[in-house]
Image (cartoon, rainbow, N blue to C red):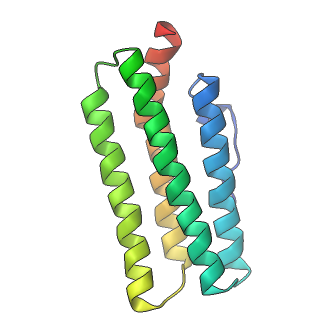
Amino acid sequence: MKDIVWSKILSVEVEEIDEDHRKLVGIFNTLGHAVRDRESAEYLAVTLEELINCTVWHFSHEERLMLKYRYPEMEEHKAEHRDLIESAKELQAKLLRSDKSVADEHIVFLERWLTEHILTTDMRLGSYLARAM
């Protein structure tokens, strides 16, 4: 399992959003290292909770910017945010119910979840905000 490495490819060209994304990538990498290092289930659960909480905060940050700058795709973007958070919380609940730890397959799911959202939906938002701000 490898880290997500921040690069220009992940930049949406809006510094405050990029800063949030760098933080999310850092927490994701911390979670990946914890899985690799076979940290305790409690540590993994807390780290996953931190990733979810930071993501919820980040999404509200993006949504504030969408409102302020009247982003035309706001409703679709917000719906994707809701779906992403729901998926992450379902994973978290599943792990808690089964008393299992985060596994490599969960990290792959979370990596795809994070990078695909940045590379598609957030790139469109960044492009719009770069012109509107």
Q: In which quarter of the image is residue 117?
A: top left
Q: In the image, what residue occupies the spot 42% across and 36% down?
A: 120
Query: Quick one: 97 or 29, which is closer to the camera?
Result: 97
Residue 28 higher or lower than 1, as above or below: above
Residue 78 visible in rendering: yes
Q: Where is residue 90 in the image (x, y as percent from the top left)?
A: 35, 70
Q: Position of residue 106 (x, y in %)?
A: 49, 72
Q: Quadrant of the N terminus?
A: bottom right
Residue 29 higher or lower than 35, as above or below: above
Q: Position of residue 92 (x, y in %)?
A: 43, 73
Number of callouts: 0
Residue 88 higher or lower than 104, as above or below: above
Residue 11 visible in rendering: no
Query: Quick one: 49 or 88, which is closer to the camera?
Result: 49
Q: Quadrant of residue 125?
A: top left
Q: In the image, what residue occupies the spot 32% across and 44% down?
A: 80
Q: In the image, what residue occupies the spot 69% across and 53% down?
A: 26
Q: In the image, what residue occupies the spot 43% across and 16% down?
A: 128
Residue 128 higher or lower than 83, as above or below: above
